[in-house]
Image: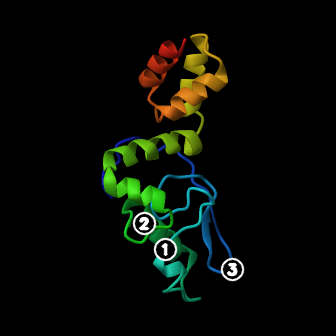
C-alpha cells in the first residue's frame, strides 16, 4: 500500500457485513467510496459481482484495497469524490481530521481539545475551531485568539 501521510496505527475501524451482503462502516471516514452520512460502501463485489461463495475474508480484503486506493469515478459520496478530484491535498487534510476525530484511540483530537482548554478556551469553542481548521492545532489557536 502507499505510504500514509499520518500514523493510522492507533485507529479503530468498525464494520458490519450482514446476510444481504451489505458491508457498512460504523466508524465515520472521509472517503469517496464510503458514505460520510451512514457508512455505506460502494464496492463492486457487494453489488454487481456478489456471489454467496465469496467469504468474509474476500470482502475485507476488497475493502482494504478500496480504502487504500479510492475510486472517485464510482463514488458513494459525491461531495468527497469531488473534493478528492479537485484538491487531493485538501481531501487528505479532511481525511486526516476525520481519522483523528472519529477513529483515533484516545490520543487524537481529544488531546488537542484538552490543550486548548488548558489555555483557557471553552471546550465547545476549542472543538469548533479545530473542526474549522481540520484539526490543525496552530491554526485553531490563531483563530481562537483572533476571535477574542
The picture places residue 81, in percent across and down from the top left corner, at 41, 60
Q: Residues within 10 Å of mark 3 (few under 14, many from 20)?
A: few
**Residue with the most extreme front position:** 147
Q: CA distance from mark 1 to mark 3?
A: 16 Å
The residue that mark 2 highlights is 66
User: Closer to us: mark 1 or mark 3?
Assistant: 1
Q: Nearer the viewer, residue 10 or 91?
A: 91
The answer, for residue 10, to whether it is visible in the render is no
Question: In the image, what residue occupies the spot 41% across and 66% down?
Answer: 65
Question: In the image, what residue occupies the spot 34% across and 43% down?
Answer: 5
Q: CA distance from mark 2 to mark 3?
A: 21 Å
Q: CA distance from mark 1 to mark 2?
A: 8 Å
Which of the image's four quarters has the N terminus? bottom left
* Earlier sequence position, callout 2 versus callout 3: 3
The answer, for residue 125, to whether it is visible in the render is yes
Question: In the image, what residue occupies the spot 53% across and 25% down?
Answer: 112
Q: Is residue 38 left or right of residue 98?
A: right
Q: How many marks?
A: 3
The residue that mark 1 highlights is 43
Question: In the image, what residue occupies the spot 49% across and 13% down?
Answer: 145
* Earlier sequence position, callout 1 versus callout 2: 1
- Name the secondary structure under disc 1: loop
Question: Looking at the image, do the residues carrying marks 1 and 2 touch, with CB atoms under 8 Å apart?
Answer: yes
Is 29 placed above or below 147 here? below
- Name the secondary structure under disc 2: helix
Question: Looking at the image, do the residues carrying marks 1 and 3 touch, with CB atoms under 8 Å apart?
Answer: no
The picture places residue 49, in percent across and down from the top left corner, at 48, 86
* Earlier sequence position, callout 1 versus callout 3: 3
Is 114 placed above or below 59 here? above
The picture places residue 48, in percent across and down from the top left corner, at 50, 86
- Which labelled disc corresponds to residue 19? 3
Amino acid at each position: 500500500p502507499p505510504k500514509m501521510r499520518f500514523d493510522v496505527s492507533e485507529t479503530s475501524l468498525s464494520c458490519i457485513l450482514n446476510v444481504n451482503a451489505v458491508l457498512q462502516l460504523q466508524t465515520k471516514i472521509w472517503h469517496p467510496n464510503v458514505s460520510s452520512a451512514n457508512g455505506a460502501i460502494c464496492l463492486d463485489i457487494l453489488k454487481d459481482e456478489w456471489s454467496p461463495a465469496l467469504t468474509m475474508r474476500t470482502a475485507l480484503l476488497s475493502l482494504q484495497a478500496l480504502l487504500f486506493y479510492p475510486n472517485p469515478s464510482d463514488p458513494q459520496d459525491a461531495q468527497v469524490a469531488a473534493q478528492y478530484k479537485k484538491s487531493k491535498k485538501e481531501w487528505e487534510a479532511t481525511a486526516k481530521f476525520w481519522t483523528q476525530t472519529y477513529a483515533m484511540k484516545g490520543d487524537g483530537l481529544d488531546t488537542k481539545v484538552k490543550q486548548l482548554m488548558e489555555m483557557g478556551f471553552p471546550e465547545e469553542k476549542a472543538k469548533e475551531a479545530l473542526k474549522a481548521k481540520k484539526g490543525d492545532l496552530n491554526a485553531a489557536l490563531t483563530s481562537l485568539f483572533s476571535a477574542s
